[in-house]
Image (cartoon, rainbow, N blue to C red):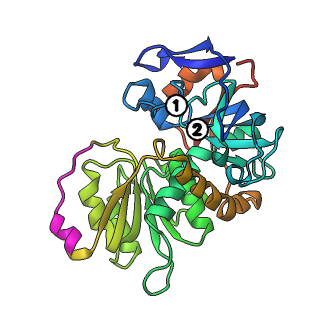
């Protein structure tokens, strides 16, 4: 099969089209004929040598695909919660190996393609939807406040793949959502997706803005990919009892914070990485997505945001585009366009 290899750690041009053996599914896994692969920031980190695959995972990049189930044992109902069959179209979360014509995925991490979506659109879903749900709703427990009112969410990097997903899910579920972005166009895009107010972080202070929008209370949950110097400001932007969820460290791994503020205001700083989590955890998130979010996609209340589709052979161009941060939404590789 054709696949995109990381020939050495470095710039985007280290990604090369190569021939690889077709993977063999183990017990509890299925073989997927890949139609499209989503491109995500962790793929860039892996290409640079900063995010190694977990033990036993493919060395090929790629954490999400969409395509057709063409192999594997689907007879164990405990491992097949959605009743999938050979020939079904699915989108799947992987620990690696998605940049290829065929990929294996744990069956519980495969979801049926939502009604009305193309394979290109479906390939943009798993990594960001699993990440957002597991962090915002499972870990940070965005929900009803102590007085019964819906809580508020601030999404840092609202125009990213994670950002557009978090905005849409939270808005569709009835929460007030604010977001940050770096240009006026990206701010408008965030607001069109459901953000009550998008804040241009280059010209505005997000702490002042969210305080003014919440009558000086602050927001209940912040989803952050920046960290570093943002963290003390984010603590100031949180309401008492608020939760800061870190899912990346683009601004640095160290922060100077006042621990007394955390104690006094009952604040929580937490974080996670999805890739190394066990199949059982991801299966639980998949079930929640299928029950709570997939109907919203089928109804058109949540829509995939695709910035650009490129032939799979142009993976290096896709990574260069990702690193430019010009995009709003997802970048997808198409394996059907003479990859």
- Which image quadrant for residue 127? top right
For residue 290, say whether it is visible: yes
Q: Quadrant of the N terminus?
A: top right
Camera-nearest residue between 5 and 325: 5
- Residue bearing mark 2: 94
Q: CA distance from mark 2 to mark 1?
A: 9 Å
Relative image position of residue 241 (x, y in whole percent): 33, 74
Q: Is residue 288 left or right of residue 268?
A: right
Asked if the residue at tag 1 contacts the one at tag 2, i.e. Cβ–Cβ closer than 8 Å, the answer is yes
Q: Is residue 199 left or right of residue 307?
A: left
Q: Is residue 205 magenta?
A: no
- Residue bearing mark 1: 57
- Which image quadrant for residue 174? bottom right
Relative image position of residue 39 (x, y in whole percent): 56, 34
Camera-nearest residue between 160 and 44: 44
Camera-nearest residue between 235 and 35: 35
Relative image position of residue 59 (x, y in whole percent): 51, 24
């Amino acid at each position: 099969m054709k696949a995109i290899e990381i020939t050495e750690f470095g710039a985007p041009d280290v990604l090369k089209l190569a021939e690889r053996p077709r993977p063999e599914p183990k017990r509890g896994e299925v073989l997927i004929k890949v139609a499209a692969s989503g491109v995500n920031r962790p793929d860039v980190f892996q290409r640079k040598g900063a995010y190694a695959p977990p033990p036993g995972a493919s060395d090929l990049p790629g954490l999400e695909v969409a395509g057709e189930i063409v192999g594997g044992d689907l007879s164990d109902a405990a491992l097949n919660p959605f009743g999938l069959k050979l020939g079904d179209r699915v989108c799947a979360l992987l620990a690696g190996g998605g940049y290829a014509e065929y990929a294996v995925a744990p069956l519980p991490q495969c979801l049926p393609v939502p009604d009305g979506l193309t394979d290109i659109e479906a390939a943009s879903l798993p990594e960001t939807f699993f990440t957002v749900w597991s962090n915002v709703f499972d870990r940070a427990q965005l929900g009803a406040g102590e007085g019964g009112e819906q809580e508020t969410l601030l999404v840092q990097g609202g125009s990213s793949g994670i950002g557009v997903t978090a905005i849409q899910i939270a808005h569709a579920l009835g929460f007030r959502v604010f977001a940050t972005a770096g240009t006026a166009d990206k701010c408008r895009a965030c607001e069109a997706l459901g953000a009550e107010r998008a804040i241009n972080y280059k010209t505005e202070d997000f702490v002042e803005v969210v305080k003014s929008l919440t009558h000086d209370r602050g927001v209940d949950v912040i989803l952050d990919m920046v960290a570093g110097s943002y963290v003390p400001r984010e603590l100031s932007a949180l309401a008492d009892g608020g939760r800061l969820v870190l899912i990346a460290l683009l601004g640095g791994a160290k922060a100077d914070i006042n621990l007394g503020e955390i104690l006094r205001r009952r604040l929580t700083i937490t974080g996670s990485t999805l890739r190394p989590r066990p199949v059982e955890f991801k299966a639980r998130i998949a079930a929640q997505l299928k029950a709570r979010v997939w109907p919203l996609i089928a109804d058109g209340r949540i829509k995939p945001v695709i910035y650009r589709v490129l032939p799979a052979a142009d993976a290096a161009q896709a990574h260069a585009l990702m690193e430019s941060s010009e995009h709003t939404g997802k970048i997808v590789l198409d394996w059907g366009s003479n990859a």
